[in-house]
Amino acid sequence: MNGTVELIIDGQTLKLPTYVGTEGEVGIDIGTLRSKTGAITLDPAYGNTGACKSAITFIDGEKGILQYRGYDIAELAVRSTFIETAYLLIYGELPTKDQLDEFSQLLSQNQMLHADMRFHFDAFPPSAHPMSILSAMIHASSSYPSPVTHGKPAREVFPFHAARLISQVRTIATSSYRKAHGLPPSYPRSHLNYTENFLHMMFSLPGEEYVPNPEIVRALDLIFLLHADHEQNCSTSTVRMVASSQANVFASASAGVCALWGPLHGGANQAVLEMLEEIHLEGDDGTKFLNAVKNKDGNRRLMGFGHRVYKNFDPRAVIIKEQCDKVLGQLHKSDPLLDIAKKLEEIALHDDYFVSRKLYPNVDFYSGIIMRAIGIPMDMFTVMFAIGRMPGWVANYKEVMDDTDSRISRPRQIYTGEKLRQYTALSDRA
Ligand code: ACO
């Protein structure tokens, strides 16, 4: 507690404590509001509500700052790797060489799915969306406890479960891709790192040695790292909500995948590419489309633009845009959709509709173009986001579990329905 504010409600003055975070953010603790005054706060979509204290990620949306455990995202993007960053997010510090080796080893030991899980894969229709497969398979995975963890207390098995989730989200994603494309299963290779193994499990062909392109590995690893956490977004707060009931980490992560799927959240990366393809097919350079967005024709939005928190720029989008140019250059590919995306950005950044609403490109605006260049199908884009976000979900789950003051999350509401009325017999209803 750092201070107090006074709230005057119906002539009564209530003193409320305030908390100031390490970066100067101020929160008013309204914990006694209802018991002292009978009133609650009303904040649909939680734009002004801090649901927890957290030491994992800091964002200053006005200044375009994103830090994981105090490290700037731009520095991590250049100097770290996805797996090192995953460790940092979950355990709070950059790992020593030994800790990183041990963590990587645990990931390798936990990368294989239980063999019986193939029956679950077989039961999905070929048209199943990879995100529905992913959430179902992560949830199903809690039904297959490993002999190492079976019957042991949650706290003791946490490192194994964390490793299983981070490792197996990749195995589930690539297995669903191979099944959808009629390819035989492909298993991880011990000499490949996390991201190399992802590419190997996706694209290797029987009888051929798969050699991952280092530039593609770097670009993909960076995409995973940039998505690794983002404080209390829709999916992470869902994970924390589920965790607050003391549900297991698989159930909580699976709920996170479901929340991520929507086009206003992680599903935006697929929606951006669909939008760019549509503009391209219509022969538009983006101008007609932007006019429709501004006139709110059919409630269209410029997908990949806007953010609840960033009101200046999304630092991840700046890094991804640079990477996008690099990858396409290195692969000697050009993509008309990249030209359309750049044109849309250029117009929007100078257009009063977008400027006055503080709408800027977010992380999803350019990530899809890189993934398309790598050969990842569009319906897997949000799965790629989920692979990247898993360490953040796991870190937030751990924070809830470690918090001795944690209580079940249970918001209140303002009721706007009918007042008490009498039941009418079926025969008397009009
Ligand atoms: N295109 C056009 N107009 C937009 C956009 C957009 N992308 N985003 C917001 N607006 C407009 C709204 O129509 C509204 O206009 P109004 O004041 O005239 O009614 C105003 O900007 C405020 O919009 P809200 O929906 O209130 O903003 P909110 O903070 O609730 O939404 C969100 C944020 C969901 C990201 C929104 O900007 C959006 O829908 N963007 C497109 C989808 C997207 O890219 N999502 C990914 C977000 S990042 C992530 O989750 C990884």
Image (cartoon, rainbow, N blue to C red):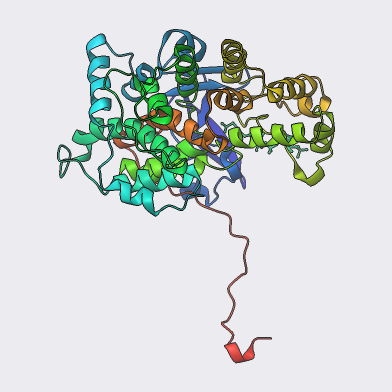
Q: How far from the left and from the top, in percent, is residue 3?
A: 48, 25
Left or right, 175 with respect to 220, comes to left
Between 384 and 277, the residue placed more toward the observer is 277
Task: Pick the quarter of the image with the N terminus.
Answer: top left
Does the rendering let one see residue 246? no
Residue 416, compared with residue 344, is above or below; it is: below
Identify the image quadrant of residue 420.
bottom right
Q: How far from the left and from the top, in percent, is residue 221?
A: 45, 19
Task: Pick the quarter of the image with the C terminus.
Answer: bottom right
Residue occupying the point 48% across, 36% down: 383
Residue occupying the point 27% across, 15% down: 100
Q: How far from the left and from the top, in percent, is residue 203?
A: 43, 28
Residue 260, compared with residue 91, is above or below; it is: below
Left or right, 393 with respect to 106, comes to right
Residue occupying the point 48% across, 42% down: 130
Residue occupying the point 77% across, 21% down: 343
Q: In which quarter of the image is ligand 1?
A: top right
Residue 250, compared with residue 341, is above or below; it is: below
Identify the image quadrant of residue 249.
top left
Residue furthest to the bottom? 427
The number of discs equals 0
Residue furthest to the front? 207
Does the rendering let one see residue 382? yes
Q: How far from the left and from the top, in percent, is residue 101?
A: 24, 15
